Amino acid sequence: MRVLVTGAAGMIGRRVSKLLKPRFEVRAVDLKPLPDEPDPWQIDLTQLDQLLPALDGIDSLMHFAIAPYSDYDESSREYVEAMFRFNSRGTYHVLEAARQAGVKRVALAGSITVLWGHELTEGVLFDESFPRLPHHVYSAFKCFDETLAEFYARTHSMNVIVWRIGAPCEATDPDSWKGYRLEKDRRALVSCDDIARAFACSMSCDFEGFAALNLTSENENPYLDLSRAEEVCGYRPMHRFHRDGVSIVGDPAPL
């Protein structure tokens, strides 16, 4: 299967692309150079005419590209404008280009922050029936992305899964997951390996239509229900994060 991965130079996209290569033929797309990729495309997703040629011969698409946090003050107007330009317009162009190219299976990197307006109540797991409730302008944009994805799936017979990604980290690097300070992040850690597993599952499953699915590894005292992700595409976490570290709980075999 030939898969196009946007944001392939970013922290998540780069790691996921590497993990997917044993199973998929990956075409990497980013605004930045991709010197180590066998099939790199350096393009601007805000320009639809640049994206369309990159989809030639592609079977499915994974979208990770966003405006990088490190380039902006998150409280600034420039950051909001960047989200308009790169995040929302980029997501629209990815879906529209897929439609025009006849690519029927798309997986988008969403965010669990679309639920962060809810209070964390002990013992309550948020499943996909909980209404979206953004707490910040970033999560509001992510709500827009989900609405747009549902629209394309419903009106253009596309199969679109939005993965509501938790707090991403490297399971082998304690600094990457111990650095999270918010309780909502610490209880929703997800290894890059598990992100790759989820996206791979969504490429090969038989699910049709639209779904917004929670995506974390196993965590102590979680607040996100992962059962729908397993039901839709067979996703099961490989890693479990706990107070003493991280362990392997799922199949450690390559994707």
Image: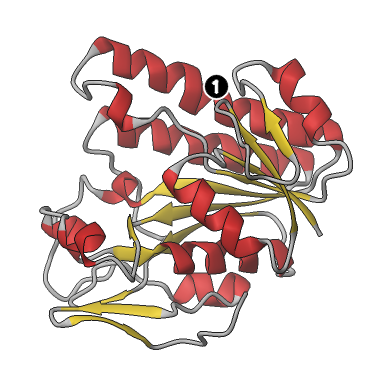
**Where is residue 239 drawn, in percent x and y?**
37, 78
Q: Nearer the viewer, residue 83 or 246?
A: 246
Colouring of the image = secondary structure
Q: Amino acid at mark 1?
A: Arg
Query: Could you tell me which secondary element the residue under label 1 belongs to?
Result: helix
Q: Which one is nearer the viewer's eye here, 14 or 160? A: 14
| Depth order, front residue of 255/40 | 40
* 114 sits to left or right of 178: right
Packing grade of label 1 (10 A; few <14, some 14-19, many >=20) is some
Residue found at x 77% / y 39%: 156
- Residue 120 higher or lower than 145, as above or below: below
177 left or right of 143 in image: left
Q: Residue at x 35, y 50 (%)?
A: 131
Q: Is residue 251 above or below residue 212?
A: below
Q: Which residue is mark 1?
A: 89
Asked where in the image residue 171 lies, by quadrant, the reply is bottom left
At 71% across and 29% down in the image, what residue appears?
Answer: 96
Quadrant assignment for the N terminus: bottom right
- Image x and y of residue 253, in percent: 57, 84
Residue closest to the far right = 57
Looking at this view, is 49 or 252 the one in front? 252
**49 lies left or right of 71:** right
Q: Is residue 244 above or below residue 31?
A: below
Rendered-image quadrant of the C terminus: bottom right
Image spot of residue 124 (x, y percent): 21, 71
User: Going 60% across and 54% down the picture, which residue do you hit?
Assistant: 17
Decide if residue 126 is in sight here. no
